[in-house]
C-alpha cells in the first residue's frame, strides 16, 4: 500500500511538471499547485512512516511551498 501511495504522490508532482515543460500547464494554475501540494503531502507522509528524514525535509518543504503557491493562486482568483 505504501508503494501505491508513493507512486501516486510522485505522479502528482511529475505530471504537472511535465505539463509545464511542454507548455500545456501554467505553474500559476490552480491544478498545478493543487497536484503539487497533494503529491508532496503524500510523499511526506510516506517518508515520515518510513523514517526517511532527508525526504521528510525535501517533500515537507515542497508541500509548504506548494501551499503558499496555491494560496497565491486562490487569492488572485478572489480579487479578479
Image: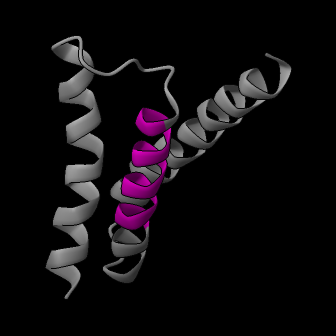
Task: Determine if residue 40 is in view.
Answer: yes
The residue sitting at 38% across, 82% down in the picture is 49
**In the figure, is residue 14 to the left or right of 40?**
left
Q: Quadrant of the C terminus?
A: top right
The residue sitting at 16% across, 64% down in the picture is 7
The residue sitting at 81% across, 28% down in the picture is 78
Q: Is 36 contained in the magenta span?
A: yes
Q: Residue furthest front?
A: 80
Q: Residue furthest top?
A: 23
Residue 10: image location, x then y, percent: 22, 53
Residue 68: image location, x then y, percent: 66, 35
Q: In which quarter of the image is residue 55?
A: bottom left
- Residue 7, compared with residue 23, is above or below; it is below
The residue sitting at 34% across, 74% down in the picture is 46
Residue 17: image location, x then y, percent: 26, 29
Q: Quadrant of the N terminus?
A: bottom left
**In the figure, is residue 71 to the left or right of 28?**
right
Q: Is 68 contained in the magenta span?
A: no
In this picture, which residue range is highlighted in magenta? 31-44
Residue 9: image location, x then y, percent: 28, 60
Task: Determine if residue 53 is in view.
Answer: no
Q: Residue furthest right?
A: 79
In front of the other: 48 or 72: 72
Q: Quadrant of residue 52?
A: bottom left
Q: How is the image coloured?
A: one colour
Amino acid at each position: 500500500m505504501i508503494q501505491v501511495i508513493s507512486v501516486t504522490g510522485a505522479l502528482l508532482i511529475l505530471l504537472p511538471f511535465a505539463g509545464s515543460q511542454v507548455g500545456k500547464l501554467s505553474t500559476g494554475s490552480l491544478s498545478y499547485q493543487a497536484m503539487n501540494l497533494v503529491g508532496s503531502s503524500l510523499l511526506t507522509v510516506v517518508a515520515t512512516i518510513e523514517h526517511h528524514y532527508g525526504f521528510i525535509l525535501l517533500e515537507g518543504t515542497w508541500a509548504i511551498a506548494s501551499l503558499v503557491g496555491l494560496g497565491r493562486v486562490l487569492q488572485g482568483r478572489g480579487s479578479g
